[in-house]
Every structure is written in structure tokens, then in C-alpha cells.
Amino acid sequence: MVAQLLGLAFPFLLTSLFDLSYAVEINPNGEVVYQDTSVYGVVNKAVILECGSTSPDMYIWSFTKPGTEAIKAVVYDLGPGPRIQQLAQTLGQLTVISKSAAVSIEKLPLAAQGLYTCQAFYDIDKEPKVYYYYVHLTVRVPVTKPYLLVSDVSPVEGSTMWMRCNLENGTGPIQYVWQHETRSGNISTFAQSNTSVVNVTDVNRNHTGWYRCVVSNAVNSEQSDRIWLDIIFGPDIPQIDVTPYTLTERGYSALERETVSLLCQAQSNPPSQYVWFYNNSQVYTGPQLTITKILRMHTGDYACLAQNTYLNTRSKKTISLTVYYPPDGSPSCSVEPALNHTSLRLHCSWSGGFPSASLHWTRDLKRVRQNDTNTGQQANPLTNTAILLPSEGLTSNNSLFTCMGSHPALKQSTECSTHTYVPPAEPVCSAYVTNNKQYLMLSCSWDGGAPKALVWWEGPGGQGKGGEENSNILILRYGTAHSEKPYTCHAKHPLLVQTKTCRLTLEAPVLLTQRRVVSVYEGSDVQLTCNLRANYLPVSEITWFNNQGIGVEDTSKYTLLRTSAWANLTVRDTEETQDSGEYRCSTSNAVGGTEINVTLVVKRHPMPPNTTLVKVTYNSRKRNEVELEWQIENQAEKGGSWTGFILEHMWVSERPGRRGSSNDSKKETEERIGPPVWYRNIIQDPEVRSHTVGSLTPTVTYQFRITSLNHRTVGHPSAAKSPAEPRFNAYPAVIGAAIGGMLFAAIVTALLLVYIIRNRNNNPRLHDMLFGLQHSQSRENINFPEDEVVGGSDGGIEEIGGLSSPGPTMALPRASSPLTTSPPSAPPTISQAPPPGDDDEPVSVTITVKATGS
């Protein structure tokens, strides 16, 4: 259909409808008037074809199909009314508008397009007029929905492609517009043309997006569905972003122990794949490389390789990452003298770290800050790490210099300080000798102060200038030192104008002792002292010589305690003859030697006072223990010079026994006892005045003596004494005899009563006399026969009387035979007669006693 429309001979004119009011003209000459007009219709729409502006008397509508010359009638009205021809059915729904010659065609088909001729006749009754109205009907077709075709939906950047907008139907001319919609939704016109094909010669990544085509003609406008155009490109050179972001001359930098993130991005479609390299070694796959707590060893080159696997293309970028790390610790400050101790040189160092730390000096920082408030002065920093302060720039004693250190890897700066001050004390001189006594060394020190002071020696005879000098020590050969002539040490400090001195005068040693004569008692330990008087020259070892002139060493007899300044000799367990005499203490130094004598006098202890026994007595008749007492003679005069006693005893003889004292008995005793021997017992308490000796043999006669003693001297023994018998005491004997008689009488009475009771039938009068007559209500209640009582008696206590007895009852002990009972102790002179009925069995008697009222 489009081809048919394009092949029409009628021109396509975009003009407005012709106004028919100007088409009717009366030709006085009687000629036919011709009028052309053009009408546009739309398929399936309605259109009206006018035949003049006024209704003619007669009209004939005819149709000429394009490309032909035949004129065919469609409808006419010759007066009776309109007559529609069969041809009109092919031209649509044709109707004649009433009271006019205009024709309306609804549902206009494309076949209705052509030339319509209306022959109109006016004034038929008069002079007829003929008009020919040529109506050129153009039927236009609306454009249908187009669809878009693309030669390549994923073209590679830089290639060529085309896009075609296909249309099934539509009356031309048709306008084509291509629209581009980005990802963000922005729509723009990519191209427009009256043709359906667009060629893109240089495709780039900006062409990525949605595309649609819009077609339009005089009737309508339609657009196609979207097509996504995906441009394949890349990868571009990667872009590496470093976080945290710090640039240096060499690239990027990071602080040690920070978390550093490296993000690699490269424009690419499809998206790139990323590989990270550290110093040409692959370390990670992915767009973002994160290093947690980066260390200084991570410094190096980091490369990001981007790969487009679809195109098999790649690109790479390398950056340099430097890890900054601070130096260890803190700055180190020092101050030293310069220019022969007339100036100061300050040193500040803080080694290590990358980059190097920044250091600068500030002098008297605290003081200057106080002055800032008061006077507005400011501290001028000294930027050099090693600076020289001339003498005019030195401050007074106790100046503070502060070195401030900063580093990019540290949030806060750190500092160190140093003071310059004069040593608080004075120079000190000393001397000492080498171990081999080859050299004498004089030392001079001036401790404290900052910086340290300069010291040097000057001695008599030019020894300080010509001798060997090593810093503050003057070395002299042993024995070349000048005695009693001063050696001077000079000390200089940069903060002082004047030098200080100390002098050392060398002299021979001088020995001292606490006592030149020492007196002790024999047997004690004594200490002899030897001290060296203070001097400036060290001495050799202090040596002791005993009373025989022999050098003393540590032995069981002698003990040495020594230091460099004294030596004490202890003589142990002294004896009068061996240890008394002159002891000598000797020493020497580089100038000379000396010695001192100490006399040791060892005395014997005095005799202890005599002791006398005042009491030697047996303490009982058993004669196995002896009590002794003694006293000290002339105690006040002796002053208590005794330390204990020796108590001795000796067997003298054996007492005669029951066997008499015949010669045979004496001989046996002597053989058993043996020769006389004194047995000792040491009493170490000097305050004791009595003692008891036990475990003695009662049949032996002893002698006792006592002797006082002190440390090593034994006194004279006292006179020997034998123990005396104990004194007789009658009171205990009388009491014992009385008690014995009472017990004997009680036993005899009891035996007599038992005898009378058992023989009451043989001697009734004696029984009645002792126990009385029976009353009328009294009766003897014997529960059991005598034989049964005797047979059942087993001792103990038995209840007397029956339950029917109205009176009180009394319990008596059930006794055994008196022959089996041992009597109590009695004097051996009293003989004990056996009781009657010695051969009878023991009996048990039950007695019932009734009490009656008066």
C-alpha cells in the first residue's frame, strides 16, 4: 500500500481546503465553468465532498480512479432525488447531505482516493449554467507502530553499526526520529530523517542506552518499543584511589599501623576484573585492596591490572606507596663543652623513622613562657640539631634547653631537655696504686654538672706536665712521688670564668691502735686493733706479726678481719706462756712504710674462795638421799670470783648388817667397793648453796666435800664430811600406835559379838544381857535356816527384815570369815590371837529390830 501511495500521480499538497464560495461564477458567454479543489481524508474516517456553495438544480457525481481516464457515475440528482450508484459501495458509506449536493463518505477506504467530478446545473428554467467541480480526494493512511532493528546490539567501541525503523503502513511523507534514553532517564533526540535507516560510523560508550524510533505523517505519530544498546569497551587506564589520601613526591604515603585502602576503578563494559600486584607479585584479586595496620615493610609499588574478559583486553597502573613510621623512643639531648670549655655545643638526635624527624631547639622554654605573659618576650627556636653557643650566649647556672621533635606519623610532638649547671660540690682528689705496685695513679673528679668539667693535674717537679696524663688521672711510677709536696688538680666548667682546684699531699702512712698494752685473763679471746689514719695515698695490705715475729694468717689460733683502712687481729683461747708478748702491725705505701707495736699480757685467773659444808644429812631413815648445804668464805673480799662448784662423794665403808661385821664380811665389802674414788658432780650455777644427792646405797657410809672454781682455776676442797642420821620425832609414832590399838580393839570386839550370836543357844544369858529380853511383840525373824544362810552367804550387804515388819529396818554388812581378813598394820610387838571358830564356815546373821512407842 505504501508503494501504491508513493506511485500516485497526484501531488501531495499540504494546503487548506478551497473556499467554494469563490468557485461559482456566471459566465455570460454561456461557457462551462471549471473549478478544482483538493480534499484530504483519512482511512476509516469520514469526509465531505462539496459541490458548489449553493444547491444546484441538478448534479452528477462521478469518480475517476487514479491511473485511469474513465469517468464513472457515483450519485446523481436530476430532480426527483439523489440516486446512488453501485460504484459508491466500493468508495465507502456514501450519503448525500440533504438540501445540498455535498456527498459524505464514512469509513473511508483507501480505494476512495481519486478524482471526484460534480457537474452542477443551475437555472434550468432560464438560461442554464453548468459548473464542473473537480474535487481531488486524497485518502491518507495513519502510520502504524514501528519496530526497530539494530545491526549489533552490543557493538564494540569504535565500530560501525546501523539502526532501521520499520513501518508496515502509513501515508507519506513520513518523518523518522530516533530517541536515546540514558540510564538516568534523560531522553534526547539521537537522529531524525525522512528515511528509515541511520548509520553510526564511530560507536562510543556514550551511545550506551535505550533507543526507540518515532514515525509521523500528516495523520498521526507512533513510536517503537525500546531496544538496549550495550557498547562494549575498555578497560581504560585504571584509577587508583588511596585512603587516607596523602600525596608525596614519590606517590602516596601512609602512616604505620593505619588501615590503608586501595581502590582500583577502570571504565569497562562488561566490568573489569582486577588483580593487585605488590612489587610484581600477585597479592589480591578484586577491586579494593585493604591493608589493616600497615607496616613499614609494606612500602613499595602497588599495581592494579584491569581485564576485560569479553574483549580479552587489559590495562595496568602502578603507584608507589611509602609507609611513614616514627623513630623509636624519643629525642636524645646532650650538651658538651666546646672551644676549650669556653662554649657549649648542643646535640639533639632522634635516629630512625621515615621520613626523618623534624627537630629544633628552644632555650629556657618555661622561663620564656612566663616572660611572655609579663614582658611579651618570645622564645626564639634554634632550628639546627647541633648548635654552638659562644661564651656571650651562655646563660647563668641551671639553664634549660629543650629539643622539640615532630614526625608525620605522630599526632603529638615529643621533646627532650638538657640542663647546663655547675657541679654542686668541689673537685675531689684521690690516689690509688695498681695491683702490681708498678704505678701510682692520682685521680681528680668533679662529679655532677652539665656538661662535665675539664680537669688536669699539676705536680711538683713538672710531673703534671711531663708525666703520663689520661683524662683526669695522673700516672706516676711507684716510688717516684714527692712526699709532703702538693699535687694540684685544676677544674674548669664552661659556665664559670674562674677555675677550681683541689690539692693532694702525699705522705707515708700512719698507724693507730686503740690500746698499746692489752691485758686479758687466760683462756679468753682478745682483739688487737690497727687503724690507718686517713691520707691521700693508698697503702699496701696491713700485716700483723705475732709475738714470735712471724706473719699472721687465719688459723684456729688467729683470726684476721681487714679492710683497706684497718686490720684487727683476734687471738683465740689465750695462754700465759704462749701468747704473751709484743705483736706488730705493719704497712707501707708509695712514699714509705710504718709499723706499730701492741703488747699483749695474758694473766692467770685468781684462786676462787674456799667453800665449807655446813650441812650433810640424810633426809630419811632409808639413807638413800643426802641433803647438803655450803657457804662461801670471805665472799665480800673475793668479789664473787667463782663460776661454779665441784661436789664430790666417796664410799668409805659398808655398815654392819644382820650378819655381823666379821672379817669375811669386811673383805667382801672391800672387794665390792674397791679402792676409794671421789665421784664428781659439777654445779655450774654460782648462786646455788644447796644440793640433794640421791640413789645412794643405804648400807654404805659416804663422805662428801665441795670445791669452788672459776674459768680455769680450781679452789681448795672443803673438809670431807659423812652424812648424819635424821633427828627422831615421837609425835608420828604415838599417833600410829593409838590408831593401831583402836583398830585391834574393834576387830576383837567384832569377833566376840559374832561368837556370842552364833552360840546364843548355849549361852542365852550372855545373849540376853547384851541384846536384852524379848517383848511380847518381839520375835526373832529368821527367814532361812542356819545351814541355808551359811550355804548362801557370799558377802556383801543384805536387807534385814521382811515386808510385813512394821518397824524400821537396819542393814548390816555381810562379812566373810575373820580368818580371811587381814588386820590393819600394828606394831610388831603385839601378837594377834586367832579368833574362835577358826574351822567353822562363815555365817550370815539377819537381825530384825522393832521399835515400839513409849
Image (cartoon, rainbow, N blue to C red):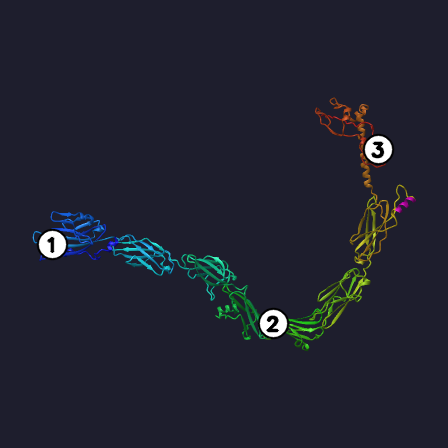
Q: Is residue 670 magenta?
A: yes
Relative depth, front residue between 518 and 33: 33
Query: To which residue does mark 2 refer?
Result: 453
Considering every residue shown, the one lying at the far right of the view is 663
Which one is closest to the eye, mark 3 or mark 1? 1
The residues colored magenta run 663-671
The answer to whether residue 177 is magenta is no
Q: Between residues 719 and 149, which one lies in front from this camera angle?
A: 149
- Point out which mark residue 788 bears: none
Majority secondary structure of magenta residues? helix
How far is mark 1 from mark 2, CA to CA?
146 Å
**Horizontal relation, residue 372 to residue 612: left or right:** left
Q: Amino acid at mark 3?
A: Gln
What residue sits right under mark 1 in the picture?
Answer: 130
| Structural crowding at the residue carrying mark 2, measured as other residues with C-alpha within 10 Å and reported as few (<14), some (14–19) or many (≥20) | many
Query: Marks 3/2: CA distance?
Result: 122 Å
Q: How many marks?
A: 3
